Image: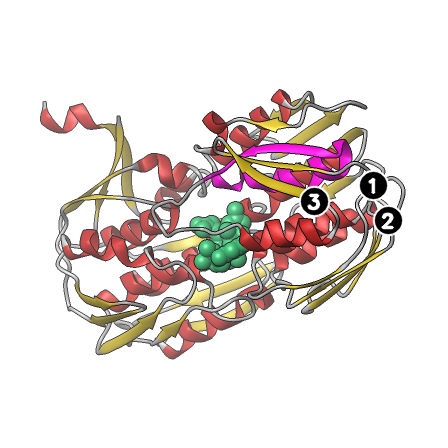
Amino acid sequence: MEVLSITGGQHLFGTVRVTGAKNSVLKLMAAALLAQGTTTLTEVPDILDVEIMAELLRRLGCEVDHDGPARRVSITVPEILAHRADYDLVRRMRASICVLGPLLARCGAADVALPGGDNIGSRGLDMHIAGLRKLGAEVTNEHGYLIASTQQRLTGGSIWLDFPSVGATETILMAAVTANGVTVIENAAREPEIVDICQMLINMGASIDGAGTSTLTIEGVEQLEPVAHCTVSDRIVAGTWAVAATMTQGDVTVLNANPAHLESALDKLVSAGAQLSRVDGGFRVVMDNRPLAVDVVTLPYPGFPTDLQPQFIALNAIASGAALVTENLFEARFRFVQELARLGADVRTDGHHALVRGRAHLSGAPVEATDIRAGAGLVLAGLVADGTTTIYGVSHLDRGYADFVPALNGLGARIERIEAESLFT
Ligand code: EPU
């Protein structure tokens, strides 16, 4: 087992480049299933989740060539696909559920293992299911699998989402692009990753209106064609670097990043005292003081992203003052504060709220990452803690942050990946 060992106290300086978004590329890979032939995706992050999705697509009958260092994936989709996503892969990556819509559209059937809850919450699928039923599919839950089927081509319909769910919007969108007639999704998610998949589907020949707004209108077409598509850059990774620069009182330029996708978070960093400027292809964050505490409320885009909430709790843990952090998306996302407390952070949680009282110092300790973003929050805390912080559960970070350790070292951090056993020898 490997762990990360961080010696805190370094200011981060330099330039870092962000690749494509995990939360986009996995859906783009699933969308490739909609067209027979070879789809190529670029700016693909070299992370574990891409490899898991590649394996899932291979089992469905695709040829997948994943070139990690070149940041490219080519997916060759056969005329006839298998339509079952097994539990052994779905349990490793919840996002596997995103093959449900495309498989149903392409094969008229999809058997996808139920992913269940995870370390950040219960993760319902009711809106995915209700949406597919509105398009004419039969959906049942049998022996731990969602079994979706349709005797004929899906039919367009009007769907109102109770909540602008990213996953449900994507499932319905991918099922609707080749349905018979017009589908309207009201209260649709507006995330940049939704705009990215709409853009790819439009290039494949789909007719979609309203990407990036709350109303998506999709006119079904007979067939889609494979394309080459460049993945939108990862706003959460870019935001993580921005918080790292602020917490370590550094000066970091983040390239291949779109600050317009991060406005709510970057605005908070300015309130915390950071100086932010746009540069060609990205932005720069300069900080020369201890940050001020900032309140945060997570909301669907364009609100403050839940995927940056743990990083901002880490920031508030060393800030001057106290902050109230409200989590509205994932009820268990505060679990990680118990780990942060091992570094000396003063955080009290009550339901959706966390009260963080900033401390002048954190002190290094062994901690466990329980999900990707909790892991990022702990790394950031370790960067400013006195002494050594050892982070267990590194595989979570591998799921979302490509080349994190070399990039951090390149900015002047002191972090290494070591075998846990060597800690005791
Ligand atoms: N929800 C339901 N029923 C549904 C769908 C969602 O109750 O049918 C609930 C969920 O349980 C959750 C909330 O609605 O409480 C938000 O879920 P949403 O569907 O918007 O999120 P998701 O598609 O499951 C994606 C990202 C998450 C990110 C959220 C919100 C991927 C693979 N995951 O999840 O990313 O936090 O959108 O932006 O795209 C991460 O990267 O660490 C991560 C968790």
Picture residue at 12% right of the left edge, 59% below the top: 344
| Residue 179 horizontal side relative to residue 159, left or right | right
171, 321: nearer the viewer? 171
Kindly tell me whether mark 3's CB lies below 8 Å from ligand 1.
no
Q: Residue furthest left?
A: 425
Write down the residue under mark 3: 230
Write down the residue under mark 2: 180
Write down the residue under mark 1: 153
| Residue 262 horizontal side relative to residue 184, left or right | left
Where in the figure is residue 36, as x and y percent of width and height?
Answer: 81, 29
Res. 118 in view: yes
* Number of numbered tags placed on the structure image: 3
Give the residue type that dot 3 points to. Answer: Cys
Picture residue at 49% right of the left edge, 72% below the top: 264
266, 188: nearer the viewer? 188
Magenta span of residues: 94-115
Give the residue type that dot 2 points to. Answer: Asn
Mark-to-mark CA distance, 3 and 2:
29 Å
**Which numbered disc, 3 or 2, marks the residue closer to the eye?**
2
Sequence-wise first label, 1 or 3:
1
Sequence-wise first label, 3 or 2:
2
Mark-to-mark CA distance, 1 and 3:
30 Å
Q: In terms of secondary structure, where does tag 3 sit?
A: strand
Q: Residue furthest right?
A: 222
